[in-house]
Amino acid sequence: MIRKSPRKIKNAKKLRDYRRKLTIRKKISGSAEIPRICTIKTNMHLQVQVIDDVAGKTLFSVQTYGKNKVADKGNIETAAVVGKAVSEKLAAMNVKKAVFDRNGKKYCGVISAVASNIRENGIQI
């Protein structure tokens, strides 16, 4: 992971998110058997990537924008659709366990909705 110098980040909120992200990434890593589920949330959209850190590859991604979008917005109702799509693709790959990476964001709202919907559909996080 390429790291920026924290002194270069002037916005206090972005600095807090970046520190939280580095702390999380020190502790977790994904493999082919237990991949890392990384959520990226913006003001308008939501993206979830399933990553194999050992090989350095993204296995697949599900998002609310682009050609292969599953929904239109980045709200809690959409997070349920995205979480279900991720769990279906993981089940098709015969993956039962995964590691959840919230990417420096707080575990509330949309981020927790994605994680809970992945759990409800049979994937252990």
Image (cartoon, rainbow, N blue to C red):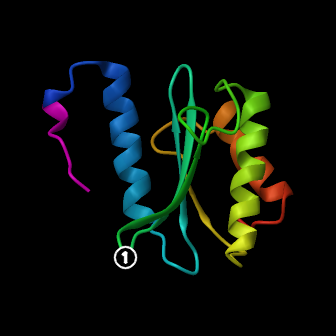
Report the quarter where the N terminus lies.
bottom left
Please report the bounds of the magenta region as a residue range: 1-7
Left-right relation of 3 to 53 = left
Residue 16 as seen in the image, left or right of residue 60: left
> Does residue 68 show up magenta in the picture?
no
How many residues crowd around disc 1 within 10 Å: few (fewer than 14), some, or many (20 or more)?
Answer: few
Identify which residue, 77 or 24, lies in the foreground.
77
Write down the quadrant of residue 110 in the picture.
Answer: top right
Indicate the position of residue 43 as horizontal and vertical percent values: 53, 20
Q: Which corner quadrant holds the C terminus?
A: bottom right
Residue at 38 percent across and 22 percent down: it is 13
Q: Is residue 108 visible?
A: no
Residue 72 lies, with reference to residue 56, above or below; the image says above
Whole-percent x, y for residue 119 in the image: 79, 58
Query: What x and y, as percent, mark residue 94?
Result: 71, 79
Residue visible at 45% across and 41% down in the picture: 104
Above or below, 49 against 90 in this view is above
Is residue 7 shown left or right of residue 14? Answer: left
Instruction: Give the quadrant of residue 87.
Output: bottom right
Residue 18, above or below 49: above
Number of callouts: 1
Q: Amino acid at mark 1?
A: Ala
Is residue 114 left or right of 7 when viewed as pictured? right
Would you say residue 75 is visible in this rendering?
yes
Residue for badge 1: 55
Quadrant of the image occupied by residue 77: top right
